[in-house]
Amino acid sequence: MPPFNQSTAQPTVFFLTGIPGLETSQAWISIPFCCLYAIAISGNSMILFVIITESSLHEPMYYFLSMLSFTDLGLCLSTLVTVLGIFWFNVREISFDACIGQMFFIHGFTFMESSVLLVMSFDRFIAIWNPLRYAVILTNSRIIAVGFAIVIRGTTALVPLLLLLKRLSFCRSHVLHHSYCFYTDVMKLSCSDTKVNSAFGLTLVICYAGLDSVLILLSYVLIIHSVLCIASKEERKKAFGTCVSHLSAVAIFYIPMISVSLVHRFARNAPPFVHALIANVYLLIPPVMNPIIYSVKTKQIRKAMLKMLLCKRVN
């Protein structure tokens, strides 16, 4: 039993969970997870590098893609230490303050990714609706301002949320159900009244993921309307083609999120290891898949990455 702070009844440590029922196989399970982390980190780092170094990619679309890669990289690194720490060294303890910090980064980068996907949808709308004024509307100064707005939007609302969590008392089990600190997981361990925390957390989800998904849908309604106004069939096909990568990124962000919610709600009788595996994998899907999608579907990114790899091989 971990020691308590008597005045606030806050535990000094929580205990993270690996894969229940598969503890003896965690060393083997760590291999695919290591591969996923390696793909996510190397893929997003390469995209960031080629966008920074290739002058031909210094355009609004690629600046927004670099923001997506940055958030994916941050999300991946937020869980790497605790997940691999459990699999490799069975290090399950995490201090309360470290847990709060990890939640800040996990939820912060998740909210930022949602915001980036929203901005990218409007970027595609502007490019199709008024291509001649595209560079005039999305100037470098405006893109920088949008970047700062995304960071501020993704982090400021988390401060009161986590402060509300710190005021709670924890006098039950200190064992979390994930390999990382997740807000609702920690909140459920409290013996205090959590109605305010639940209401505020739900409000944030609606204001971020809920509102962003509606606005993304609206932007694609406008994109479809703009495309249908194009006379040339070939131009319409080309315009739709520029949206494929973004639509794929939206799908791999929202579908796993919805799937995890459905599994937790309607598959409560499933073996514990199923919930644990899904919870660990779902945060890795966007960071792993986005670099693959954009390197395959976006010709300019693919050419820049191949050029970089060939140059390294020659050297």
Image (cartoon, rainbow, N blue to C red):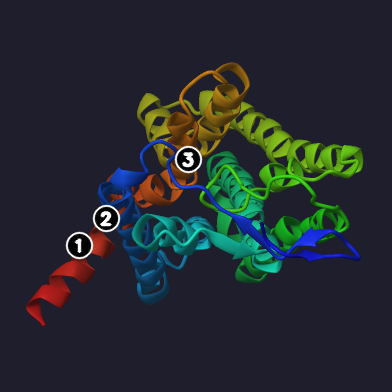
Any part of residue 235 in sight: yes
Above-or-below relation of 123 to 223: below
Residue that badge 2 annotates: 302
Any part of residue 229 in sight: no
On residue 306, which mark appears?
1
The N terminus is located in which quarter?
A: bottom right
SS under mark 3 = helix
Residue 230 relative to residue 203: left or right: left
Residue nearer the viewer, 180 or 152:
180
The amino acid type of the residue labelled 3 equals Tyr
Residue nearer the viewer, 239 or 18:
18
In the picture, residue 277 is in which quadrant? Answer: top left
The C terminus is located in which quarter?
A: bottom left
What separation in Å lies between label 1 and label 3 (alpha carbons)? 29 Å
What separation in Å lies between label 2 and label 3 (alpha carbons)? 26 Å
SS under mark 1 = helix
Measured as percent of width and height from the top left, residue 103 is found at 66, 57
Dot 1 crowding, Cα within 10 Å, few <14, some 14–19, many 20+ = some
Please name the residue shown 72% across and 65% down the image: 3
Above-or-below relation of 273 to 176: above
Q: Earlier in the sequence, mark 2 or mark 3?
A: 3
